[in-house]
Amino acid sequence: MEGLIGLVSTLHKSCTKLGDFGSDPLPSLWDSLPSIVAIGGQSSGKSSVLESIVGRDFLPRGSGIVTRRPLLLQLHNIDSGEEEYAEFLHLPKQRFTDYSENFSLLLLDLTIRAAMVRKEIQDETDKITSNSRQISSVPIQLSIHSPNVVNLAMIDLPGLTKVAVEGQPETIAQDIEKLVRSYVEKPNCIILAITPANQDIATSDAIRLAREVDPAAERTFGVLTKLDLMDKGTNALEVLEGKSFRLQRPWVGTVNRSQADINTNVDMLAARKREREFFATSPDYAHIASKMGSEYLAKLLSRDLENVIKARIPGIASLIKKGIDEAESEVDQLGRPVAVDAGAQLYTILELCRAFDQTFAEHLEGGRSGGDRIYEVFGTMLPKAVKKIPFERHLCLQNVKKVVSQADGYQPHLIAPEEGYRRLIEGALNCFKDPALASVETVHRILIELVRKAIVGTQELRRFPTLQYEIASAANAALMRFREESKKTTLRLVEMESSYITPDFFRKLSATNVVPYTEAYYLKISSNVASYVNMVSESLKNSIPKAVVYCQVRQAKQSLLNQFYLQLGKKEGKQLARLLDEDFELMERREKCLKRLELYRAARDDIDSVSWTE
Ligand code: GDP
Ligand code: MG
């Protein structure tokens, strides 16, 4: 049995260390662990019962921390003669041997620190904690090693209240009930429902809540405190014999120290002795004395807890396995820790660049979104822009007349206005420059966007913000160079078209039977130029995309990071390491994950050893 309880301690520790407070959406390890939870109204004697089970004074009263944060108590029985001590999970290796003075101070100190600790873990893991400063669901974990205790895991919760007192938020009663409920509604929680005997059992908040969450009373222990404070001539037999309120487990009555006893430092052993005497000599309770009192309650609880844990071992084992699987796959996803030597670092960087290139190529060529927008530029945007070119204005009768006569100078042309044609064609073809440049620019912007997408979409790169930045800068710089090349090439295409006019086209035309310098004559010139420009336009609509793809898209695919690779080759160890600076949050996450894995594995080993010996 020792092993079982030790196991529970290990698991509880693992859970708390992991920041796993049972508020995960997944069934957590915490949820599957059995524990004993003390609930009851304020001043019902909750702390007193726990203390008497532990056999030591240590819980602060009044404005104490236990009313604000759950206190997880793990009681470990040690051989008599060994020194007893207590240990907080968050202060490992600090053993406290003086239960009164240091403890109270430490717990008070925790009140202040709790706010900071809470802030860190609250956002992610803790859905239960209200914003109020008054209570927090983050537990304090305390283990007590003593020859005077039985093996038990217990949780002391804030007392249920009805009204807020000064300094507490209006919602305090609901907040506390919500917190308490979050513990007791778990089916593996053994409820210690504490009611003072001098209060009508019908008004007990503890019983009310226990009844709600455990209607069959399968896991509720009824504890009556303050039996010594009952009015003379009355007794609690009705309740203790289960006649007033039936539970599956026996009711246990206790007599703890009164406030006066505490004030006069009546020690715990004396209090227990007095409790035993109270029952043994009481005319009302002598016949059930062996089943009354704090010591009996402690034994009962210990036995129950052990049974529950035994039944749960297979479930816990499978949860741990699930935890290990999850942590392992998360570690895989987060990637291995970065190598330390320069060669391996360079290799890693090149691998990452390749991964980026691959993602970029998928965006460009299909498989991922974005590349299709380049086709839109050629298939839709460019033809539309060409269509919008105001050729009519350029080739209107008036302009044709003006250009043709200006081209002739003082000597009218003799056969055909060749220079006039040339100028009209040149002027019209110039209009293609804008759509050509717009295509270059739009494709450039699409490629920049694809680089961004590829950076974000390359899973392996996520952990390296510096490298992300450097790759993106190098890629963008390359794209800018490609853009300049593309501009030059497309403009050259347009210029080439206007530098040489296909003579065959005009040879086939006849102008001959129109009287020169008439309106019909100029209209003919205009329509000839228009049909030539149309022909050229068809060919530019094909050749501009080719130039853009050749200079920008194809280059991006083939040599986006070439410059970067060249620079990489010149870098030294330190510079390479800087490129692999990991995202701090991610490093932290990996560390946490590895830690969790380690804890889960340790827990699994513990479980294995217990399963073998049992
Ligand atoms: P909690 O608020 O539920 O934790 O209650 P405490 O354990 O702090 O007890 C409240 C007060 O009731 C304290 O002054 C205790 O000394 C007193 N008290 C608790 N149990 C008994 C008991 O069985 N008999 C007497 N006479 N006083 C008790
Ligand atoms: Mg208390």
Image: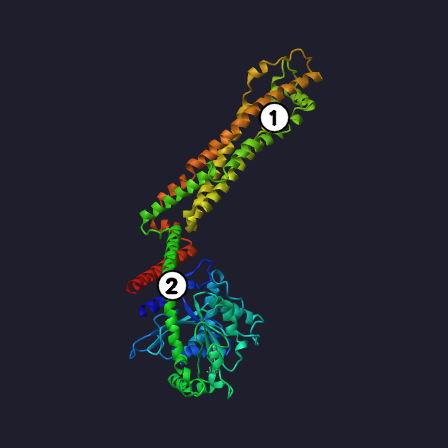
Tell me the residue at 36%/62% (across/down): 313
Q: Residue tagged by mark 2?
A: 312
Label 1 crowd (10 A; few <14 / some 14-19 / many >=20) = many
Q: Comparing marks 2 and 1, which lies closer to the viewer?
A: 2
Graded by Cα atoms within 10 Å as few (under 14), some (14 to 19) or many (20 or more), the crowding at tag 2 reads: some
Above/below status of 424 relative to 14: above
Q: Residue at x 41, y 67 (%)?
A: 34
Which colour scheme appears in the figure?
Answer: rainbow
Q: Position of residue 511 (x, y in %)?
A: 64, 13
Residue highlighted by disc 1: 428
Residue 88 shows in this picture: no
Residue for point 64% across, 26% down = 391
Q: Is residue 489 above or below residue 144?
A: above
For the residue pair 502 and 294, the one nearer the viewer reads as: 294
Is residue 302 visible to the viewer in this orientation of the structure?
A: yes
Secondary structure beneath label 2: helix
